[in-house]
Amino acid sequence: MRTRTILRAAHGAIVALALAGCAETNLALHMGKRLDSGSASPSEIHGAYKIGNPYQVEGVSYTPREDFAYDETGIASWYGPGFHARRTANGAVFDQNAVTGAHPTLQLPVKVQVTNLENGRSIAVLVNDRGPFKRGRIMDLSRRSAQLLGFEGNGTARVRVRVLPEESLQLAASAGRKGAPPVQVAAATQQPVPMPRGEVTVAALPPPANSATPVQPVALPAPAPVAIERVRDTGLYVQAGAFLQYDNADRLRLRLSRIGPAAISPVERGAQRFFRVRIGPIATVAEADRALDRVIAAGHAEARLVVD
């Protein structure tokens, strides 16, 4: 795997580190020393409620905001070994074996549904970190999340990311968000209701050396549920801009034709019609990355990868 570039905030300074062992370049912000994630409390797993101020990484500006209606498609990558047991952007403890992720602008923590549009796998993910900061990526997932979604080996996947509003509001309340609806707690006079039990896997431990005493089986927790949705055809494009006037879009299309097959794609947004200028469809993420770099180098800094 190729070397990843990491941006880490420590003592108010941003330090660049090079780590090997992951498939995508990631500049996620991680703070503090390595911790024991195995003994993390729920507050350390979720972290404190945080939106944060606007910030800039490698010339790109990001404006965090609360958004319980977020629903986007794009390219996801994954991160893990170099960040395991470190603090995330909102003070949680990152565990590469937990089902978590990072997003550059959503409120933290937040619960999202991530669907791999290439194989239909879908899981609920706790977002408690900032990242990724590689152009053309909308989300970074933990190694375990990438495994469950089936793209750990590829390094990237076309995904849909949708905030789960009810779960996220309850999560925000427990993490300290002001104005969030209170978490419902059963009254003390009510009889306790047992938690539903999922399937477990029973595995026998090997007997200790020089011992004839049989070892009792140990119940292992069931894996995180993975839903399968219908796989739909998607196209991968570089979108350079969107205009209200067709003539402005056409001028940009002509300039970008030297880079690739540029076309104008109209779309309705409320009562307005926009004319999007795109290059594509593009066959692979690697080719799309190269095309995006060329479009940005041509002076279109707001260009991005889109999955449609």
Image (cartoon, rainbow, N blue to C red):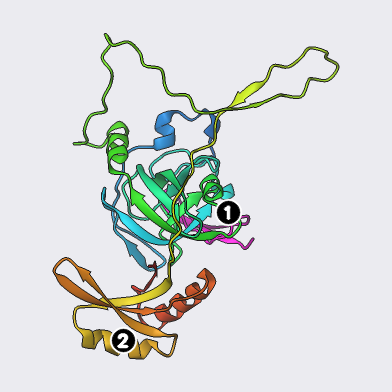
Amino acid identity at mark 1: Glu
Q: Is residue 221 above or below residue 262?
A: above
Location of the C terminus (image quadrant) = bottom left
Residue 174 is situated, as x and y percent measured from the top left of the image, at 31, 31
Q: Is residue 125 magenta?
A: no
Residue at the farthest front position: 230
Q: Image quarter for residue 243?
A: bottom left
Residue 228 is situated, as x and y percent measured from the top left of the image, at 47, 48
Distance (Cα) linking label 2 and label 1: 37 Å
In this rendering, the count of numbered labels is: 2
Q: Is residue 307 above or below residue 139?
A: below
Residue 3 is situated, as x and y percent measured from the top left of the image, at 60, 61
Depth check: give the residue in front, 14 or 76. Answer: 76
Residue at the farthest top position: 189
Residue at the farthest left position: 271
Q: Residue shown at 23%/29% (left/top)?
A: 182
Q: Is residue 108 left or right of residue 280?
A: left
Q: Is residue 274 left or right of residue 226?
A: left
Q: Is residue 271 above or below residue 212?
A: below
Q: Secondary structure at mark 1?
A: loop
Q: Mark 2 or mark 1, which has the lower sequence index? A: 1
Tell me where the magenta segment starts and ends, as one range. 1-28
Residue 13 disc label:
none
Residue 71 visible (yes or no)? yes
Judging by the rendered image, the residue that carries numbered circle 2 is 252
Q: Is residue 262 left or right of residue 273?
A: right
Q: Is residue 13 magenta?
A: yes
Q: Residue shown at 26%/8% (left/top)?
A: 189
Residue 152 disc label:
1
Q: Residue shown at 59%/48% (left/top)?
A: 81
Amino acid identity at mark 2: Leu
Within 10 Å of the Cα at label 2, are there few (<14), some (14-19), or many (20+) other Cα atoms? many
